[in-house]
Image (cartoon, helix red, strand yellow):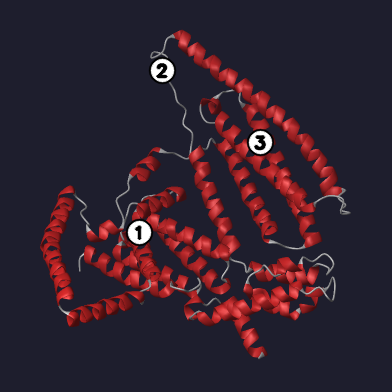
Amino acid sequence: MNTKKIQLTFFLIGTLLFNWLFWQEQLGLNLLIFNVFILLSAYIIYPNSFKSKYVIAFSILCILTATFVFLYGSTIAKITNSILLLICIGYIHQPKLKAIFFAGFTAIINFFNLPLKKVFNPKNSIDNQQKSLNKIFYVLKIVIIPLLFLSLFIIIFKFANPIFNELTLKFWLLIKKLFSTISWLRLLFIVLGAIVIAAFIYHENILKFIHKEQKLSDFISRKRKSKNQLPNNVIQTLSLRLKNEYRSAILLVCSVNVLLLIVNATDVNWIWFNFKYNGNFNLSQFVHEGTYLLIISVLLSMGIILYFFRKNINFLPKNKLLKQLSILWIAQNIILVISVGIRNYHYIDYYGLAYKRIGVIFFLIATIVGLITLYIKITQLKSAFYLLKVNSLNIISVLILLSSFNWDIIIAKYNINTISSEKMDVLFLLTLSDKTLPLIEENKHLLNQENPFYTEPTYRYEDKLNTFLETQEKLSWLSMNLSTQKAINYYKNRK
């Protein structure tokens, strides 16, 4: 069987499988099955692509994160798996690629390039398109003209013969009933599935990212111009311009170092060693403002360092001071990261875990790695391409790490066991996923700890529980994840 027939076979099977796996289902075991099917199909259609270490690595990560979805059913695991599957397909379609973001762009462009046209018109040439149009017009000419005359005679006989009119009405009622049973939403879902499967199975030969990547390097190279090519006055002007840029860089980096030193000194004195919270300020705002300050500071640091260390300033014989000041600035940003981490620790200590507080922890980890790569860039003359390549891997690693934990259960257990009932946000507990309902059931006394007559949390819990059980009855085994199944079994055993 040739490649086109194999592709068409997997396309048709995949479209039917997509519809069966996901129609009116939640993501769970079905996502793991879908990942296995896509990767197995890709291996059969593009076996040479699996010689790439990137394809093998991302295939393993796809199965791993899909397994996390099956185990925990967390939203972050579902998002991470979708991103990884997209990147993996980009690598499969273009196995010569190395950068994660180029693989992702390749897959996205392939997805939006109307992949269905590959199914129905593989060569996609102008001649083939013209032939297809001629064929359509030919069929229309053969079908439409007889239909017009047939319709005319039906109208005539309807008015001429009452029995024929009655038969015609019954026929149209039957047609109407037949079409009323068709789910148009289901048809749209099948079309969506066909587009998704086609984007995975078929691909256009998008080479621009390969060509672009081949021109890029992990290291900055010095751009020299021969003295014979330029007159002396131009050489002197360029040299003076470079020295002025160096002086400007020294002034700027020195100034922001002093400014950040003042901020860090106050943070270290207050937050690290003398922090006391007595409720006289908003702790949430205290953490979030520190995080926003950190984001701005790190982005500015990266932007300024990338700008000044982009070209020949890296090769100035007396640029040691600028490098030292830049490294000091990076070190101060790491101190700022630690300060935000301590703020977040105090917030968790007083009010417990929450999604954003966990997000801050992992953001800080990614930030420290990003700052270390900035240090490597300065000391080892790395390029902006290197920074993008390493930090895209950094972000993917953080997402995978986030996906590997059952956060809703961790949050619920920590808050119930650690935070006092007076400070606990019970309504927040009720916003966690349904898998935490058994934990809340076992600690139901917390729902009305403020007032024995205050029953809103209890009502919310009962409503959430009823909705959960009703929803699960409508789902099949395809939607199963082990964490939710454990909650279902808990309530089944209570009956």
Residue position for label 2 = 226
Total numbered circles = 3
Q: Is residue 96 left or right of residue 146?
A: right
Residue position for label 3 = 327
Image coordinates of residue 39 in percent, x first then y, are: 38, 66
Pick the residue in front: 422 or 102. Answer: 422
Residue at image location 72% in from the left, 39% down from the top:
332
Cα gap from disc 1 to disc 2, whole angstroms: 50 Å
Quadrant assignment for the N terminus = bottom left
Disc 1 residue type (three-letter): Ala
Q: Is residue 352 above or below residue 367?
A: below
Disc 2 residue type (three-letter): Ser
Image coordinates of residue 38 in percent, x first then y, are: 38, 67
Disc 3 residue type (three-letter): Ile
Residue position for label 1 = 199
Residue at image location 77% in from the left, 65% down from the top:
425
Image coordinates of residue 253 in percent, x first then y, are: 67, 29
Q: Are marks 1 and 2 in contact (CB under 8 Å)?
A: no
Q: Secondary structure at mark 2?
A: loop
Nearer-N-terminus badge (1/2):
1
